[in-house]
Amino acid sequence: MKVQSPAFSVAISLVAIVAALGLIGLVAGVSAAPPGEAWAKLGLHSLHLALGLAAFLAAFLIPLARLRALVPGLLLLVFGVLVLMLVSPSFGRVSHSAERWVQIGSFSLQPSAFLQFLWPVALASWAAKDPLRLVQPRELFRMLVAFFILLFPVVLQPDTGTLLILLIVSAITLFFAGAPIRYLRTLVLGVVALCGLLVFAFPHVQARMGEFFAGSGFQVGRAVEAFQLGGISGMGPGQGLMKNGWVPEGDTDLIFALIGEEWGLFGCLAVWALFVAFTVFGVLASRRADSRYGAILMAAATVTIALQAAYNMAMVTGAVPIKGLPLPFISRGGSSMLALSALLGAAIRAAIEPRRSRVPVSDLIPWTESNVMG
């Protein structure tokens, strides 16, 4: 692929940032491993990073036209798997009050995680194919109906977090693509109403919200203890006291707390700074993309990854309700690593691939040159 896009140098910086995050996750995961499990954690985390690299390269190397043609079929496949998990008691595996996992030999996959790759690709394709769709209420309504049908089995698991994250990603992506703000206000009001409905519909959501407003919660309490032990400079690599199961999901969703214990405030700020840099460079890559599709997909990928990172770090500190959500590229988790790596690979390919039309992307997406993106 001949690269002439001004987004190429920014894309290199994005890859370097993600590589740094993956290295931090590997070191932190091994350092925070209980005694006698370091080598096992090293092997497992290395495997997940290798799978993520393979997913990134596969999505990057596949021609965009072929990827866009494949995504609808892949979405139907994931939808079928999610439905099968609900109707077949022996197919899905229950974890944390939800049936979210498919066991394949010794590997566990979370099918809903792959929607974080497939849906942004599909949404960007939908928005880029015909810009007039964004100002037609009927077309927007049809797209939202398809979205909720696709996510309906996810809600029934129940996995409300995936639904809300993809809703927010969709709203921001449509805003960037040029959808009128009056339509998005309606969508935001709908999201707020949906959140209230989900709280009353699912007992475990009620419990988590109750813990959050009460300022309590076992997981958050242990995470805060880890931050307190770490202080400014941390206890040192491998010297943490909370890694022996004291922080639940310490090597996955709550790895940020163990980073805080062993690496201190400085280590947490380094992780935070890398995600801020990722967001900034992601926006720059989107603005410099040659094609409308590349600009929208790069923006969607940036929002998807940055939003999850921000929520994970916020929930570990008790700023938002707890949710089973990994820290992108740092937490050990094969499904998330595969999905987000593939999304980033596809987005970078779309951003740097030269456009066929000579119409500037800024003429197609007014937001790219407005004070909103500036």
Image (cartoon, grey):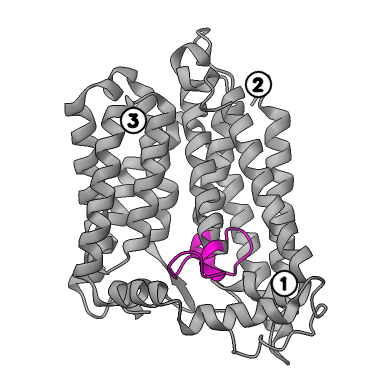
Q: Residues within 10 Å of mark 3 (few under 14, many from 20)?
A: some
Of the numbered discs 1 and 3, the one sitting upstream in the chain is: 1
Residue that numbered label 2 is attached to: 5
**Of the pair 203 and 361, the residue shown nearer to us:** 203
The quarter of the picture where the N terminus appears is top right
**Residue 49 in the image, given as x and y percentages of width and height:** 64, 62
Of the numbered discs 2 and 3, the one sitting upstream in the chain is: 2
Residue 51 higher or lower than 167, as above or below: below
In this rendering, does residue 200 appear at all?
yes
**Residue 16 in the image, given as x and y percentages of width and height:** 74, 46
* Residue 22 within the segment the image draws in magenta: no
Q: Is residue 21 left or right of residue 127?
A: right
Residue that numbered label 1 is attached to: 28
Of the residues shown, which amino acid type is indicated by label 1? Ala
- Residue at horizontal 51%, vertical 35%? 299
- Residue at horizontal 42%, vertical 35%? 173
Q: Residues within 10 Å of mark 1 (few under 14, many from 20)?
A: many
Q: Which residues are magenta?
A: 314-336
Task: Count numbered badges in the picture.
Answer: 3
Q: Residues within 10 Å of mark 2 (few under 14, many from 20)?
A: some
**Residue 309 in the image, given as x and y percentages of width and height:** 56, 56
Of the residues shown, which amino acid type is indicated by label 3? Trp
